[in-house]
Every structure is written in C-alpha cells, then in structure tokens.
Image (spheres, helix red, strand yellow):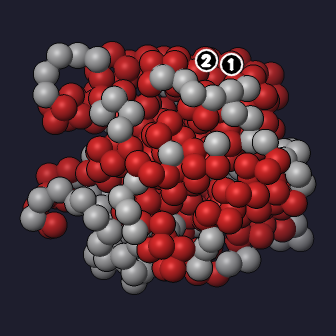
C-alpha cells in the first residue's frame, strides 16, 4: 500500500514537473521545439507559464494537492471544505507558487478566502468568484482517493466537500469525484477497466450531487465526455493515432470536460502503464501539466512507485524541497 500511495504522489508530481516544459504548446509545436517527444525533465522555455524554473520543479498543479495532503494528515484524514480552504490559503502564502501560477480561478478563490478585500474584485461569473468548470478541483482531488483505498463512495464524498473550496459548479465537482474514485479503485487493486468504470461512476455521482450543493452552470458533462474519451481509446489503430484522435475529439484545454476525460483516455490507451501514460500526457499538448498529473496519479496508484523511472523521486524531492516517501509513509499509517 505504501508503494502504491507513493506511486500516486510521485506520478502526479512527475506529470506536473515534466509537463511544465511543454504546457501551452500543441503536440506539433512540442516536437518541433524539443526535436521530438519529451521523455524526461526539461527546463521550461521562456514563453511558458513555468519559465525560470529548473527541470523537475512542480507548478500549482501538484503543489496545491501537496499542501492539501499535509493538512489532511494533521486532521488525521478527516476531509472538509474548511480544511481545503485553509490548505489553499497556506499554498497562497508560498510566493514562488502563488505569484507565478495562480490563474484567475485560484486568485479569485484566495481573494474571497482572505476576506477584507474589495468584494467586487472577487466576482467572476453571475455574481460569483468561481470560473466555469476549470480543472483545478480535479487536479487536487487525488489525495481524497489515497485516504480511502477501495472505498470509492467515501472518496467521492470527500471529493465533493473538498472541491467546493475552489469551485461551485457541478461539472468541476464531477471531475474531482471522477479522479478521487479512480485513485481509490486503483489502490484497491482494481484493473484498468475497473478504474475507468470507477471514474465514470464518480463523474456521474459528482455531477448529480454537485447540482444539489452548487450552481448548475451550463457546460459539457464530464461524465459524458469521459465515456466519449473511452470510446476513442478503445478504437483499433496505433497508440499514436488513438492519442491524436483523443486530443482532437475531446480537446486538451483547461476545462474539466477536456482535462479529466483526456487523462482517463490516456490511461486506457496505454493500458495503465505508468511511464507511457506520463509521456502521453506530457506530449498531448496544451494543458499538459494537469493532464499528465491526473493520469500519472491514477497510473502510479495502479502500479506503485517502482513503475516510475529510477531516480525521479530524488529529483522531485531535491528540486522542490519535498519528502514524498515520508509523506506516503504517513498516509499509509492512517488509511
């Protein structure tokens, strides 16, 4: 169990750090700039959001759930919206992450949580500070699966609570529940097929429950689009062609309805193999950090830390001043 938990943490971190170099480029632009596919850590170019960071450093995609894990440990695994809000505030206190990577949704959420600021600056849509169905809730959801190995319903329940710290639309919540459910199933010795089905169930449940507790903004259903992504993934043809069809048919942008289905599609296309899944996310283009991190978390939970390239753990720890193995030990002791 400890190895699977560490695999999930490390898979999410590696996906984010490796994807930092390719973010916001198309797959063709990635191949042109890097003279081929990116298969290792690389320094982010100057025209990317992670510019100035070293190869192997993570962005907000992994650093927010990393802080969330620390808060969950202090609370002995008891998740809540309030705990997640405090974690987001603590993350925002780290200037190297907040100033460089807090995009519009996160900035608005932090503005509201800090209080005492002009409330008009916190509004974004329909009198609210939330964005429509972005992937932030989904990228920070994998720790909720880690808390409940094989207990998908519990993972969904916690994801429903935690996701409301940063979003209040049903589709963002749906994406978070899909990721938490998939990780929970993967830790419980689920197959790739069972993990995909758990993700579908989490997305459907999260969408329905999200409408009860949050705003029902218009938008594409994450649940339906995961089903679409799995359809692309199970077609005949080469892996490269199926990945291209997945990106073209589903998209690879910041919407939860693109990021989450794309990540599930990559897991299925690559039959859950951790490194191919990670490489797929890093090279798919556009929102590579988030897609690779979510897909890496799921595949890492399926296969454990031993499935990730030897030496990557020490690179992530050293470049980001983290101790992921110790964190995995603590998580294993409370699940």
Please give left or right for residue 294 compared with residue 116 in the image.
Answer: left
Residue for badge 2: 201
Which residue is drawn at the image coordinates 50% and 36% (left, top)? 302
Residue for badge 1: 205
Q: Position of residue 289 (x, y in %)?
A: 42, 56
Which residue is drawn at the image coordinates 64% and 42% (left, top)? 1
Q: Secondary structure at mark 1?
A: helix
Q: Secondary structure at mark 2?
A: helix
Task: Say if 16 sits above or below 190 in the image.
Answer: below
Q: CA distance from mark 1 to mark 2?
A: 6 Å
Crowding near the residue tagged with mark 1, few <14, some 14–19, many ≥20 C-alpha atoms within 10 Å: many
Q: Nearer the viewer, residue 198 or 222?
A: 198
Crowding near the residue tagged with mark 2, few <14, some 14–19, many ≥20 C-alpha atoms within 10 Å: many
Which residue is drawn at the image coordinates 56% and 60% (left, top)? 62
Q: Position of residue 315 (x, y in %)?
A: 44, 74
Task: Say if 39 sits above or below 290 in the image.
Answer: below
Q: Position of residue 156 (x, y in %)?
A: 72, 29
Q: Nearer the viewer, mark 1 or mark 2?
A: 2
Q: Quadrant of the C terminus?
A: top right
Query: Which mark, residue 72?
Result: none
Please give left or right for residue 34 compared with residue 142 in the image.
Answer: left
Please give left or right for residue 62 compared with residue 43 in the image.
Answer: right
Q: In the rendered image, is residue 72 in sight? A: yes
Q: Is disc 1 in contact with disc 2, using a CB cutoff of under 8 Å?
A: yes
Q: In the rendered image, is residue 289 in sight? A: no
């Amino acid at each position: 169990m400890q190895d699977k938990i560490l695999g999930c943490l490390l898979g999410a971190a590696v996906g984010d750090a490796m994807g930092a170099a390719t973010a916001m480029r198309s797959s063709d632009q990635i191949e042109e700039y890097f003279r081929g596919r990116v298969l290792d850590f690389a320094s982010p170019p100057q025209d990317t959001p992670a510019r100035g960071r070293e190869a192997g450093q993570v962005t907000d995609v992994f650093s927010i759930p990393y802080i969330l894990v620390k808060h969950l440990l202090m609370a002995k695994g008891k998740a809540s919206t309030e705990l997640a809000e405090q974690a987001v505030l603590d993350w925002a206190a780290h200037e190297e992450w907040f100033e460089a990577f807090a995009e519009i949704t996160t900035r608005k959420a932090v503005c509201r949580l800090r209080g005492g600021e002009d409330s008009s600056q916190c509004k974004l849509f329909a009198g609210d500070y939330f964005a429509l169905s972005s992937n932030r809730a989904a990228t920070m959801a994998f720790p909720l699966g880690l808390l409940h190995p094989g207990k998908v319903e519990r993972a969904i329940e916690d994801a429903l609570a935690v996701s409301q710290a940063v979003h209040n639309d049903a589709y963002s919540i749906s994406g978070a529940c899909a990721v938490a459910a998939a990780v929970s199933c993967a830790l419980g010795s689920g197959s790739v097929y069972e993990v995909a089905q758990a993700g579908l169930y989490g997305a459907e449940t999260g969408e329905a429950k999200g409408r009860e507790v949050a705003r029902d903004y218009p938008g594409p259903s994450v649940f339906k689009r995961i089903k679409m992504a799995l359809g692309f993934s199970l077609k005949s043809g080469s892996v490269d062609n199926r990945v291209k069809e997945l990106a073209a048919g589903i998209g690879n942008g910041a919407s939860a309805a693109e990021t989450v289905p794309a990540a599930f599609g990559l897991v299925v296309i690559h039959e859950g193999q951790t490194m191919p899944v990670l490489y797929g996310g890093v090279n798919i283009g556009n929102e590579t950090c988030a897609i690779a991190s979510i897909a890496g978390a799921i595949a890492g939970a399926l296969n454990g830390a031993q499935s990730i390239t030897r030496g990557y753990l020490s690179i992530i720890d050293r470049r980001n001043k983290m101790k992921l193995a110790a964190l995995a030990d603590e998580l294993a002791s409370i699940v």
